[in-house]
Image (spheres, grey):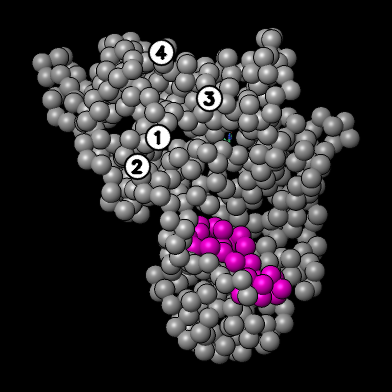
Amino acid sequence: MTDRPKTAPGQKSRNRQVAEQPDLTTILSSKVVGQPNVINVIIPYVEMFQAGLSPENRPVGVFLLLGPTGTGKTRTVEALAEVLHGSSKNLLKVDCGEFQMEHEVAKLIGAPPGYLGHRETQPMLSQQKLASVTSERSGLSLVLFDEIEKAAPSMTRLLLGVLDRGVLRLGDNSTVNFEKSLVFLTSNLGAKEMMREINPDFGFQSATTGASREDVSDKLQSIALMAVRKKFSPEFVNRIDHVITYQPLNAESFAAITDHEIASLQNHVNTRLGTRCFNIEVPFETRQWLIERGTSAEYGARELKRTIHKNLTQPLATMVAKNQVEPGTRVRVEVGKDRESLELRSTGPGETSAPAHPTVLLVDDNRDLLQFLQRLMAESGWELLAAENASEARKIVAKRKPNAALLDYMLPDGNGVELAQQLRGMMPKLPIIMMTGSVLGPEEEAICEEHDFPVLRKPFLATDVMNQIRARITAKTKTGR
Ligand SMILES: Nc1ncnc2c1ncn2[C@@H]1O[C@H](COP(=O)(O)OP(=O)(O)OP(=O)(O)O)[C@@H](O)[C@H]1O
Ligand SMILES: [Mg+2]
């Protein structure tokens, strides 16, 4: 087995970040925290597919993901689905635990003709199923075989065909082509031995007490490789492009994941409740409390979501259901005196007076984006004032005095940063957000920093824009800036 791809994928070109190209690495790193090696290995294969340079007669890439529980193996594939297709559901997941017996493998490929009921056994893997997890954005399908070591041996043989020739033969003798698929295999192989390394108090004797993170990481990698070689035949292992070992997460990563979970809860509140939304305020101490309860060396961040759900989301939902939260207010979440639970307190109406129906100026010559955001904002009760160039934008601001402005950097008659400064001259307190598909020059970066124009890199999710605008308007209301 080699740790290098057999077909060397194109080196990531920094230049490709200009124009409207998504910076996959940045987006994926924000979703899968503390595993930079993983992202650096996977992204070149995606880029190779996007460039039309993937090899024929085999999947675009085959990865075996190993490592301690709750470190982001499954999350990686879900996050990639979000980035490529806009939803974590755009992924074909095969739970190998369901195929432990030889006869169960028929569920995967359908029964051969002649078998009783073969017409009724729809194969789990079919060309249509693969196509159904692609999207308009990307034709790359993501296939995840979870807990591969649990599957019956015949499943491993079937997989061998997929990994080797990119083809799966179904029960009815038709074939499924995997040339436009990334295949992920996950396994708990070596997980116990890894725990021994990570957590010496876990009833085992640790060989690496006091070892550096690099040492532990090397050790985990070799444990993983050894376990893989023991379990799978060399021909199977040889067809895997990369065996990726996930590292235990550190305190910084746990904090980043917690922040991310709280931000997506806020996002959810904003999109679900629309004009009735409110701000959730979670101070540092509360975040620490959630991290202490939701994370461990044993389970990684696996319990974090549940901890947040139980202690924050559910009590919040109860408050909303009981009409205890006024739209536009704040809910502050603090650690209770007994330190056993969290206390949620609504600040009541009037503390914030951000407009419930803001008027937002959007300047971009991309009509599709204008129309899309206009529709979306209208659904939330916002009014969008659209301009395709700088001069139209100035006229609108003079007349309509919007609550916030969203400006594209590249405009047909100038650049967005200059326009932003002019608009501030007209309305000194106007919250302005820049959008760009490229990298701003250092001077422009400095101007944005000085004037507090946050920069959103394209592509972004519509909810990110809405949240940025909301946050800016609320901040302006609170600070009076
Ligand atoms: N590196 C990470 N970045 C972001 N979130 C993570 C990360 N690791 C774990 N999480 C959080 O923990 C949850 C569980 O992680 P995940 O399902 O990816 O674990 P896993 O590595 O697949 O574990 P297992 O071996 O038990 O299947 C995720 O839904 C996510 O909320
Ligand atoms: Mg998993």
User: Residue 221, which numbered label?
Assistant: 3
Magenta stretch in the rendered image: 444-469
**Picture quarter with the N terminus:** top left
User: Which residue in the structure is indicated by mark 2?
Assistant: 8
Residue 268 in sight here: yes
Front-most of residues 211 and 432: 211
Q: Is the C-beta separation of discs 3 and 4 under 8 Å? A: no
Q: Is the C-beta separation of discs 2 and 1 under 8 Å? A: yes
Lateral position of residue 435 relative to residue 343, left or right: left
Lateral position of residue 352 relative to residue 393, left or right: right
* Badge 1 or badge 3: first in the primary sequence: 1
Image location (x, y in percent) of residue 43: 43, 45
* Badge 3 or badge 2: first in the primary sequence: 2
- Residue type, mark 3 in image: Gln
Crowd band around label 3 with a 10 angstrom C-alpha radius: few (<14), some (14–19), many (20+)? many
Q: CA distance from mark 3 to mark 2?
A: 22 Å
Q: Secondary structure at mark 1?
A: loop
Q: Is residue 455 magenta?
A: yes
User: Residue 231, which numbered label?
Assistant: 4
User: Which residue in the structure is indicated by mark 1?
Assistant: 4
- Residue type, mark 4 in image: Lys
Q: Main secondary structure of the magenta part?
A: helix
Residue 184 in sight here: no
